[in-house]
Image (cartoon, grey):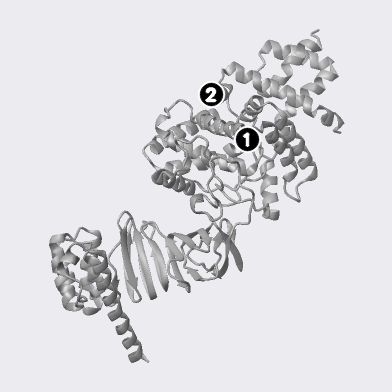
Amino acid sequence: MTTCRQIRPLLPRLPDSDLNPGEARLLEAHLAACATCRHEAAAFTRLPELLSEASLPPPRLPAGDQVATWIMEQEASRLPMSGGSNPAFRYPNWPIEHRGWGVGAALAVLLAAALLSVQLPVPDLRLPAAMDRARVAGHPIHPRRGHPKPQQRAAWRVARLAGTPVVGIAPVRTTGRLTVGEWLETDRSSRAQIDVADIGRVEVEPNSRIRLLETRAAAHRLRLERGGVRAKINAPPRLFFVETPSAVAVDLGCSYTLRVDNAGRGVLQVNSGWVELAHNGREAIVPQGALCQTRPGIGPGTPYFADAPAALQTALAELDFANGGSRALSTVLATARRRDSLTLWHLLPRVFEAERDRVYDRLKRLTPPPADVTRQGIRRLDPTLMRLWREKIEDNFWREEWRRSEEWQ
Amino acid sequence: MESVLSPGTRGAGESQDDEAMQRVAGGDGAALAELFDRHKTRLYGFLFHLVGNRAAAEDLLGETFLRLYQARRRYRSGSGFRPWLFAIARNLALGELRHRSVVTRAQGRLVDAAGTVEDGWDARRQEIGERVRAALARLPEEQRSALVLKEYQQMEYREIGQVLGCSETAARARTYRARVTLREALREWWEAEP
């Protein structure tokens, strides 16, 4: 009979089930006669089962599409902390800040169910938070200095308006919190309202996906991936930003509606005040009553008033997004009213120099430029002269708005 | 412990990974998302066992996929996606531990983390989990990685060797020693078990 000393080395291999027939026969014969080795063999056989009991804290892992977007943004922007050449790179806040467990019974059920599996029982619990860490307030980027200490992540109050909006994967029954980095999603039957710190409110329309990027005294920033928001902000200009796939809306003191479709195309409609749209150096200043389309890869088009002639709107879309040529420009110039002066002003830097004189001439007839503004200056897009002319257009616009409101009353 | 996946399924998964990596190499974000979703949970588990901290494991998971994306053109189809992915993760985790020079502290955290399981957890399961995790945490890193890859990831020894940068035989030996060490670490508690 084989001795215990000969048999013991075989036991740690039992979980692999890879003993050859000879080894298996020796083991079987020995175990039949040796209670100590039987006990030991049972221990090794049970080891995988025990390991499966070593459950882990549930991770807060983002969805793949969010990670992919984030990674590709990192790569595109090549921020200094984006790894690559710096092997000591660290994420201060990649998925989510430490907020304790707090998911309660549902979590326990999920984990208990997962325990029955031999896989690591680590169900996803939360959608991501601060992947966009470069902009997360209060979390400076350090090259691998270890993890930041847990700290309270700023959050905005979310209230359900209809249906069941979701923050992360947590449904908002009445009210909830949207922390920096988290997504709020509404389906076709749900709406939500977000308190933008203490400066205003944003109503999130159905079928929307929106994320809080940062909130601090100097800037509050949302990302609207799709859907629509109605924002009403009462704050100094340039405190509130909404990023979309095709432009950033910069609040200049206003209320507005911003919608983005699944292809990233957007449209801004300003209800009161002004909003600036910007993307890659291309800007549009959109006053109340006006709209502006945006397109991925292009940015904001030329703003126009909702009551502008249909022919002007169509021609403008051709110019902005469909390589419209001289004919489209002619249509815009021919159909523009005095009220459309701001539209023409936006066209000045967007047309080729050869066409700029045509825009200048038409705009001059609709809103004569201030005395100091010359054709030559506008031809070379002198910033001061451009600003002076725009201010005159804006003055006229507000006088007209005031007159309209007086008539309406 | 054998894989719950049939060899056919496993092969299909590998070819899916290869196909996705080809798309990732072409800059396809959807393929990157697909790979992340497919591997995130297991990779998180592996990283947690290495660094002993949820936040660190979550961070390293993201970092792993960022590195994967940066190295996407260096991946060779058929060379084994999972070992490649886990090797990236392990290297990052070891870098993390080296950076802090706190391998022992990380092991301590692993032991501490044993007490962080949620309230309402079955007390006995919790105790088992705590003891096993603490015992795992005390294993030398190479043994711990080998055992975790074998038992939790159901990797073949050949794949484990690829992750750890050693031969198949060495991977087998490390797993073997890990089991022996773990058995000894749990002996006292085990013997007291009814």
| Chain for disc number 1 | B
Q: Amino acid at mark 1?
A: Arg
- Residue underneath mark 2: B162
Check disc 2: other Cα within 10 Å, few if <14, some if 14-19, many if 20+.
Answer: many
Quick one: which residue is furthest to the front in this view? Answer: A372
Residue A334: image x %, image y %? 15, 73
Place of residue A145 in the rendered image (x, y in percent of width and height, measured from the top left): 58, 41
Give x and y (percent) for residue B103.
66, 31
- Secondary structure of the residue carrying numbered label 1: helix
Residue underneath mark 1: B100
- Counting other residues with Cα less than 10 Å from the Cα at mark 1, is it few (<14), some (14-19), or many (20 or more)? some
Residue B100 position (above or below residue A160): above
Q: Nearer the viewer, residue A216 or A268?
A: A216
Q: Is residue A359 left or right of residue A402?
A: left
Examine the rendering and report whether any part of residue A388 can be seen.
Answer: yes
Amino acid type at image mark 2: Gln
